[in-house]
Image: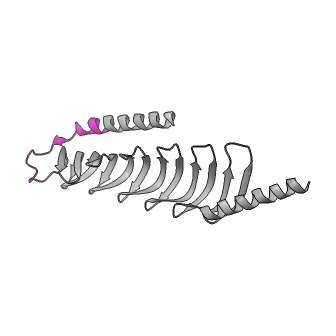
Amino acid sequence: MKTSKALTLLVIIATSLFTATNAWALTNCPEDNQQVYHNCFGSLTFAKWGTYVGEFKDNKYNGQGTYTYINGDKYVGQWKADVKHGYGVYTFASGNIYEGEYRNSLKHGQGSYYYTNGDKHVGLYKKGIKHGLGTYTFANGDQYVGEFRSNRFFGEGNYTFGSRSEEHTSELQSRRNVVCRLLLEIKHAARMTSSA
């Protein structure tokens, strides 16, 4: 987890430097926020939502920017017409971190989600949810590699227990199926051991 946090910090620093470098090519936005912000670098603060610092085009967040929300969340990344669009890093006040692709302000495309409990998901997202191929690594070392649909294990997948080298490959339809299938296998193994 320390490596992933260090990598995330490096990405944030690199993105900030990239933003600052590109911002030098832009003029500063007008101090009067009633004027149009076009092809400029500036900031806007909203008492109920937070502060945006970054690039503007046609009076909208566009290009590289950072939005710091009043609840403590922070997004550093690309914007297009006032929505998160492109690569970005979203750090939640809870400490969870998502880094990856956005489309229309939703996680969409390749991304990595780091949970404060030590769990991690690396894979595809579609319209804000885990959907497609991915790897979910639990803090205890267990790992699922396979398909996701609607934020759940689904379809073909491989579940490996971190505490032992046992592997289970099966067609998975939901988390419940994974647990039920594993319990059945454990019961079957226990019966086989007791009858031997």
In the image, 166 versus 98, the foreground residue is 166
- Of residue 137 and residue 157, the one placed in the foreground of this image is 137
Residue 3: x percent and y percent? 50, 34
| Residue 30 falls inside the magenta stretch | yes
Say left or right for 33 vs 78.
left
Residue drawn at (33%, 47%), measured in percent from left and top? Answer: 73
By secondary structure, the bulk of the magenta-drawn segment is best described as loop
Residue at screen point 72% across, 54% down: 168
Q: How is the image coloured?
A: one colour
155 above or below 120? below
Viewer-closest of 186 and 33: 186
Magenta stretch: includes residue 38: yes
Q: Is residue 103 left or right of residue 123?
A: left
Q: Residue furthest right?
A: 196
- Return the x and y of residue 72 as percentages of the image width and height: 30, 45
Where residue 28 appears, as percent x and y from the top left, is: 15, 41
For residue 103, what is the image quadrant? bottom left
In this picture, residue 187 sits left or right of residue 40: right
Q: Which one is nearer the viewer's eye here, 126 or 60? A: 126
Residue at point 46% right, 43% down? 116
Residue 182 location, x and y as percent?
71, 58
Position of the C terminus, as image quadrant, is bottom right
Residue 133 relative to residue 96: left or right: right
| Residue that appears at 23% across and 53% down | 49
Residue furthest toward the front? Answer: 194
Whether residue 191 is situated above or below residue 5 in the rendered picture: below
Q: Examine the rendered structure and indicate whether residue 121 appears above or below residue 4.
A: below
Q: Which residues are magenta?
A: 18-40
Q: Residue furthest bottom?
A: 173
